[in-house]
Image: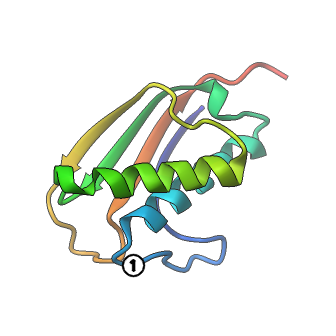
Amino acid sequence: MYLSGQVARNAAGEAVGPGDLAAQVEQAFVNVGTALAAVGGSFDDVCKLTLYLVDWTRDKLPALGEGVGKAAGRLGVDPRSPRHGSASPPSANPTCSSRSKQSLSCPEP
């Protein structure tokens, strides 16, 4: 299974946390957890996690960690599986500062 394009939008399609990287990261991770659960998987099944962070600078690292930590608490998991980060140029969409794609291996039913 391959997931891609998880962004900070809730189930109603509304932007979550415009201008708040921690809130956006949290929502993107929660979206990933929701998608994984829908097919019987979890973060334990993720073999690669790539984060694209718009206009990245090292001073945003605490907000990234905060968002991942909050998502972990909400989901009851440790989503820090193998991952790769990549900086992206500023986005034309100011409501979206992060996105992710995942490659995962889920057990056969």
Q: Say which residue appears at 29% left-offset and 50% top-offset.
A: 61
Quadrant of the image containing the N terminus? top right
> At which x and y percent is residue 72?
61, 46
Q: Position of residue 34 (x, y in %)?
A: 69, 51
Estimate the x, y position of residue 46 in percent, counting from the top left: 57, 28
Viewport quadrant of the C terminus: top right
Q: 37 and 75: which one is in front?
A: 75
Residue 2 or 9: which is nearer the viewer? 9
Name above or below for residue 75 compared with residue 49.
below
Nearer to us in this view, 16 or 38: 16
The crowd level at tag 1 (other Cα within 10 Å; few <14, some 14-19, many 20+) is some
Residue lying at 51% horizontally and 33% vertically, measured from the top left:
80
Q: Nearer the viewer, residue 69 or 45?
A: 69
At x 50%, y 49%, the residue is 68
Snapshot quadrant of residue 42: top right
Quarter-of-image position of residue 59: bottom left
Residue at 32 percent of width and 64 percent of height: 97
Q: Is residue 109 left or right of residue 52?
A: right
Give the residue type at disc 1: Pro
Locate residue 40: give its quadrant. Answer: top right
83 w.r.t. 3: above or below: above
Work out whether residue 17 can be spotted.
Answer: yes
Identify the secondary structure beneath mark 1.
Answer: loop
Coloring basis for residues: rainbow
At which x and y percent is residue 43?
Answer: 63, 34
Q: Disc 1 designates what residue?
A: 18
12 left or right of 97 in image: right
Left or right relative to 72: residue 61: left
* 45 to 31, vertically: above or below: above
Q: In this orientation, does residue 34 appear?
A: no
